[in-house]
Image (cartoon, rainbow, N blue to C red):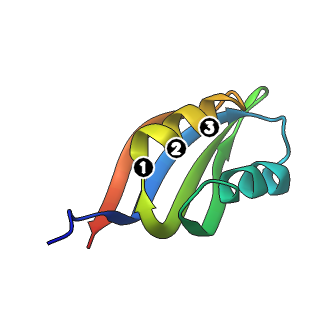
Amino acid sequence: MEKPQITHIVLDVLKPHQPPLPEFASFLGEMDGVTRIDVSVVEMDEKTESLKIIIDGTKLDYEALRSHMARQGAVIHSVDQVVVE
């Protein structure tokens, strides 16, 4: 029997204004196992954007997501939902 895998995760993320949102979403979509990225701006201030990011895929790896986002200066504030199948 296969180990259960994360197939859907909702994250509260803080990132700098750069890179722009479309570029950041595409960057996230490059990760192995990611099939869909949905990014919404929740709040914006002078230097940062608070984002709600919904990621769908197969065998999503939370630690890999966290470190991949960090390469663009983004930090996960919270995990708001997870679906494991």
Q: Earlier in the sequence, mark 3 or mark 1?
A: 1
Q: Are the residues tagged 2 and 1 within 8 Å (C-beta)?
A: yes
Q: Can you give x and y, in whole percent of width and height, for residue 42 in the image?
A: 61, 52
Which numbered disc, 3 or 1, marks the residue closer to the eye? 1
- Residue behind mark 1: 61
Give the residue at x 55% y 54%: 52
Q: Are the residues tagged 3 and 2 within 8 Å (C-beta)?
A: yes
Q: Secondary structure at mark 2?
A: helix
- Front residue of 9/31: it is 31
Q: CA distance from mark 3 to mark 2?
A: 6 Å
Give the residue at x 85% y 46%: 20
Q: CA distance from mark 2 to mark 1?
A: 6 Å
Against 73, is 80 above or below? below
Other residues around mark 1 within 10 Å, as few (<14) / some (14–19) / many (≥20) = some
- Residue behind mark 3: 69
Q: CA distance from mark 3 to mark 1?
A: 12 Å
- Residue behind mark 2: 65
Give the residue at x 84% y 39%: 19
